[in-house]
Image (cartoon, rainbow, N blue to C red):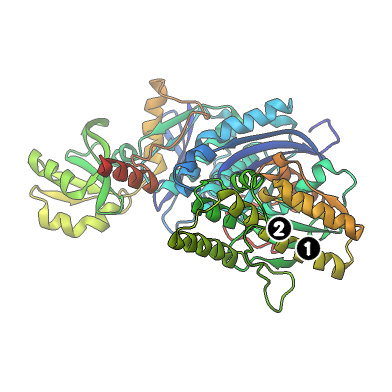
Amino acid sequence: MKLLAIDSSGLVASVAVVCDEELIGEFTVNYKKTHSQTLLPMLHRLAEMTELDLGSLDAIAVAGGPGSFTGLRIGSATVKGLALALDKPVVEVPTVDAIAYNLAGHRDLVCPLMDARRNQTYTGLYRFCGNRMETVKSQCAVDIGEILAEINHTGTPVVFLGDGVKVFGEYLSEHCCVPYLFAPPHLNKQRAGALAALAAQYYKEGKTVTADAHKPDYLRLSQAERERKAKLYAGH
Amino acid sequence: MNKHTDIRILAIESSCDETAAAVVVDGRDVRSNIISSQISLHTIYGGVVPEIASRKHIEKINQVIKEALKEAQMALDDIDAIAVTYGPGLVGALLVGVAEAKAISYAKKLPLIGVHHIEGHICANYIENPDLEPPFLCLVVSGGHTHLVNVLGYNSYEILGRTLDDAAGEAFDKVARAIGLGYPGGPKIEKEAHKGDQKAIPFPRAHVAGDAYNFSFSGMKSAVLNYLNNCRMKGIEVVQADVAASFQQAVIDVLTGNVERALKETGAKKFAIAGGVASNATLRKAMEQLCMGRGAAFYHPSPVFCTDNAAMIGVAAYYDYLEGKFSGLDLNAVPNLKLGER
């Protein structure tokens, strides 16, 4: 089974190819947010290096959201275009799950934190039983205080990762009451390798969608929709 | 690889609120032209909401592309190149089409052609006018653009004039909102204007001093707002249809004024209009009469090719294809891409 995985949900652009439990190649760049310009050239170079025949892929995996709205759409449109042209199914992997899978095998509670602006984070809670990931709390958009209260309530050690660590680091150091760690740099951001490994499990479980049906799961309405809703609500 | 000798281009357009795809053969033969409009989604917000537009594009784009191929009775294997609008427009909206087009071009090893949206609008005139060839004068009027262009060649444009503030279509939208007609303003004002008197209110015709070909519409829009305010203060009843008709005529007078000067001074014998506002029948009629009076041929696309569509992008791309002008996999969306700066 061969999968291509693409993640452009955050500052990192990452593409990977896995084949039967083997990571064939991964290209991750955490430099500047120009995914539109970098993503396909990255895929092209990875494909050249690994002599990848796109036609031999079984499916194409994508970070399905949440994340930067525009970043998600660049990844999604790229995957939809590839899958349309190659007639392949798409595997949508929740972004926060994929980030958590970077720490497969870790014994502590795993808490990815993505910066969602407005003092919010896209986050979730995960535990590993060996390499098998269990979801303690599904990915969601909440205030940083809310997820931290939940973590403090468990009373168990936790490891934080994701681009939110930088944003909320100070808050965490002041308010986290359980022992905590920050994941090291090579594991703390989106990695298409981890996404691909999770996607391979999904694929085996038959969890695929068509290229036509795939769309990002933003976990959030657009600002205009939020404001309209608030206005309607206020009117009642 | 392909056995056919004609050039078949699959074109994608997603610069604003229409998700569109088309198949165009040899630059003028439109085999399909699929447009998925989002107007109803944006109406409740009184205008296009960029994030909502972008979200809708990603949901619709594959279906629209497939529909375009199906209607053209082709598969991707029958296509010779992929064309896509990469600017100007809403960046988030453009990026969907650009990423999709690049992925298809890469997966199918097909050349990619990034197209300028306004050049597309101009090229829409080639579709139904097989005899039309450059050079000619073209007025592009839409919700986002007002350009008077000297089309020197298929890939060569000289801008004679542009709006210094609002686009003509934008002014229509704002005035429509002010008199309670809602969005989209262009068609609503046109419809209302039929019932009104264009001479009822003498709105000013703004001419930009020192430059014969530039436009300004924000003063005209303000004049309407002032008029409405004045009526309100004095308790005078506003006749919606008269405002619509008088405002529309003021815009048309300014547009025709500049075109007339340009025809005279360039000596052009062919004139075309393009863009969403070009489907306004009153504007067309005025331009047609102007051209007739000056002995110039008048060209205009059907309304379906005036609105944002992908067929026009396929037409523009064809002439790039002939010149071997292709884009790389690093093609980006350029929201403020200037005409003639490619």
Residue on which the image places disc 2: B252
Between the residue at mark 2 and the residue at mark 1, the CA separation in whole angstroms equals 10 Å
Residue B181, x across and y down, in percent: 52, 46
**Numbered disc in front, either 2 or 1:** 2
> Residue at the location (58% across, 41% down)?
B18
Q: Is residue A150 left or right of residue B263?
A: left
Residue found at x 9% / y 44%: A152
Whether residue B334 is visible to the viewer of this picture, yes or no, is no
Residue A109, by quadrant, is top left
**Other-residue count near label 2 (Cα within 10 Å), few / some / many at <14 / 14–19 / ≥20:** some
Pick whichever, A156 or B297, lies toward us: B297
Sequence-first tag of 2 and 1:
2
* Residue at the spot of label 1: B259
Q: Quadrant of residue B23?
A: top right
How crowded is the residue under tag 1: few (<14 C-alpha within 10 Å), some, or many (20+)?
many
Q: Residue A192 or A92: which is nearer the viewer?
A: A92
- Circle 2 SS class: helix
Give the percent coordinates (x, y) of residue A124. 24, 39
Three-letter amino acid code at the position of disc 2: Ile
Q: How many marks?
A: 2
**Left or right of A119: which side holds B323?**
right
